[in-house]
Image: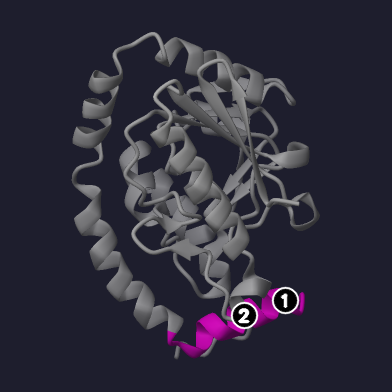
């Protein structure tokens, strides 16, 4: 069974992370599946928009830390985390968030152009609790989407907020009743598909043009963190379900 499945609905490609037994956490297979789904979206001229969601009322719990401890990478070279966060897409992509969008899951949503969220969805960037930073776009993108100090609260505390609160912060485009996020996202995709594809692509290219340099700088800092004892301790503590013991090394 594929970790990512696609379904064509009109001119929209519905992309679903289908790993509910792991809360749709991103491992190498999910990253490869998402990259392939995005290639399908980009290469088919009859597809105009994409909607990204997760199976069984969970968007994604983020990076699969157990897989990462085994040396498995959730990144695709040139495309970033989950094959999405640094991908150069010309077509609009909408996140439809139910349940958890934590860590890398939140960053997948931030990598989309629009976000629709159920009112009880949970958005959070808990990487600092594991000795990491939100290197899949969280540190770069979130301060551009909401006021600085609110973004810093996400990034420095690691505490989550609900979809309702995310709507109040202006972080999401639509807040829906639980269970309705995908349906509303598909409706929004139809509205976007009415517009000129070249114009949509040009908007995306201009808006995202400054991000490549920021990701390059971030890679340098992330490399240092990944070589630290603290990051190993953070991931091990998570896998062992205990509190980490930080050393600052």
Q: Is residue 195 above or below residue 178?
A: above
Q: Is residue 151 above or below residue 121?
A: below
Residue pictured at 57% horizontal, 80% vertical = 71
Residue pictured at 39% horizontal, 53% vertical = 137
In which quadrant of the rendered view does residue 139 lie? bottom left
Q: Which residues are magenta?
A: 227-243
The crowd level at tag 2 (other Cα within 10 Å; few <14, some 14-19, many 20+) is: few
Locate residue 124 relative to residue 49 in the image: left or right: right
On the image, numbered disc 2 is attached to which residue?
69
Residue pictured at 47% horizontal, 41% vertical = 38
The one nearer the camera, 212 or 125, is 212
Between circles 2 and 1, the one closer to the viewer is 2
229 in the magenta segment: yes
Q: Secondary structure at mark 2?
A: helix
In which quadrant of the rendered view does residue 185 lie? top right
- Contact between marks 2 and 1 (CB within 8 A): the answer is yes
Point out residue 201 in the picture as x, y percentages from the top left corner: 27, 28
Q: Earlier in the sequence, mark 2 or mark 1?
A: 2
Point out residue 227 in the picture as x, y percentages from the top left corner: 43, 87
Point out residue 57 in the picture as x, y percentages from the top left corner: 75, 37
Q: Which label is found at residue 239?
A: 1
């Amino acid at each position: 069974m594929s970790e990512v499945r696609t379904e064509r609905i009109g001119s929209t490609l519905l992309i679903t992370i289908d790993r509910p037994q792991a809360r749709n956490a991103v491992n190498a297979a999910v990253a490869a599946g998402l990259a392939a789904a995005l290639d399908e979206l980009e290469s088919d001229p009859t597809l105009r928009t994409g909607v990204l969601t997760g199976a069984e009322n969970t968007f994604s719990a983020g990076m699969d830390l157990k897989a990462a401890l085994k040396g498995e990478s959730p990144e695709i070279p040139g495309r970033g985390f989950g094959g999405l966060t640094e991908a150069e897409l010309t077509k609009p992509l909408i996140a439809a968030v139910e349940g958890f969008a934590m860590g890398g899951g939140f960053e997948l949503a931030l990598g989309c152009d629009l976000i629709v969220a159920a009112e009880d969805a949970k958005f959070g960037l808990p990487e600092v609790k594991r000795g990491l930073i939100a290197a899949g776009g969280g540190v770069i993108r979130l301060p551009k989407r909401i006021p600085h100090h609110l973004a810093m609260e996400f990034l420095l505390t690691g505490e989550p907020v609900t979809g309702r609160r995310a709507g109040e912060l202006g972080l999401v485009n639509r807040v829906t009743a639980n269970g309705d996020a995908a349906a509303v996202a598909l409706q929004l995709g139809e509205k976007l598909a009415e517009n000129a594809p070249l114009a949509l692509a040009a908007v995306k290219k201009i808006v995202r043009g400054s991000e490549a340099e920021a990701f390059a700088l971030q890679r340098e800092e992330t490399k240092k963190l990944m070589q630290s004892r603290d990051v190993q301790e953070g991931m091990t503590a998570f896998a062992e379900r205990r509190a980490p013991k930080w050393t600052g090394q």
